[in-house]
């Protein structure tokens, strides 16, 4: 479970857009669902693109899938796009807000062609839905 820039400020950053849950709240929701699904989850948040690239590379060695909220990097990061394309495990992209209904620059999604799917617009629950999708894919389900 990778979270990108500014997600450490959830709950205080633009709550009218991103909701009132903190990242700790989101992680607790995901842990609860992961336990019911019988899976382990590792959480990493970074405001630095290279750290997220390194974590994607690491995940290919010891994870079955990745749930990624790239934040603003979804619209700009060729480095993340290339890292996702380079690993052979499914990556599910999640966003708290419906990025397709927001500013025009947010509608350009450079990761979309290489992720297995996207979950957008369900607030904190986007992470839970992303986890469910990732587990489904890791267990051999089709996207």
Image (cartoon, rainbow, N blue to C red):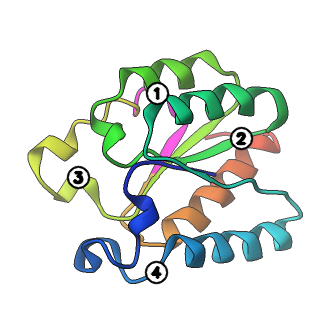
**Is residue 95 positioned above or below 35 on the image?**
above
Q: In the displayed structure, does residue 19 sit left or right of residue 29?
A: left
Give the mark nearest the N terminus, 4 or 2: 4
Label 2 or label 3, whichever lies nearer to me, is 2
Q: Earlier in the sequence, mark 4 or mark 1?
A: 4
Q: Is residue 119 magenta?
A: no
Kindly check if marks 4 and 3 are in contact, taking CB atoms under 8 A apart as contact.
Answer: no
Question: Badge 4: few (under 14), some or many (20 or more) residues near its Cα, within 10 Å?
Answer: some
Circle nearer the N terminus (2, 1): 2
Q: From the image, state whether disc 2 or disc 1 is nearer to you.
A: 1
The residue where tag 1 is placed is 80
Find residue 52 and report its horizontal and vertical position in percent. 54, 36
Provide the secondary structure element on which disc 3 rests. helix
The C terminus sits in image quarter: top right
**Residue at mark 2:** 65
The residue identified by callout 3 is 100
Disc 2 to disc 1, C-alpha distance: 15 Å
What's the magenta region?
A: 112-118
Between 112 and 105, the one lying in front of the other is 105
- Look at the magenta stretch and give its main secondary structure: loop
Residue at (41, 26) in percent of width and height? 113
Residue ID for mark 4: 21
As rendered, which of 70 and 112 lies closer to the eye? 70
Of the pair 31 and 23, the residue shown nearer to us? 23
């Amino acid at each position: 479970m990778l979270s990108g820039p500014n997600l450490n400020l959830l709950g205080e950053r633009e709550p009218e857009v991103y909701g009132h849950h903190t990242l700790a709240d989101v992680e607790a929701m995901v842990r609860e669902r992961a336990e019911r699904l019988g899976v382990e989850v590792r959480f990493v948040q970074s405001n630095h693109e290279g750290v997220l690239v390194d974590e994607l590379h690491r995940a290919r060695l010891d994870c079955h899938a990745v749930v990624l909220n790239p934040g603003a990097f979804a619209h700009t990061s060729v480095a993340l796009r290339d890292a996702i394309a380079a690993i052979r495990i499914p990556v599910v992209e999640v966003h708290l807000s419906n990025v397709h209904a927001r500013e025009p620059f947010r509608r350009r999604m450079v990761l979309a062609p290489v992720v297995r799917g996207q979950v957008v617009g369900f607030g904190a629950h986007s992470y839970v839905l992303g986890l469910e999708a990732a587990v489904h894919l890791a267990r051999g389900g089709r996207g």
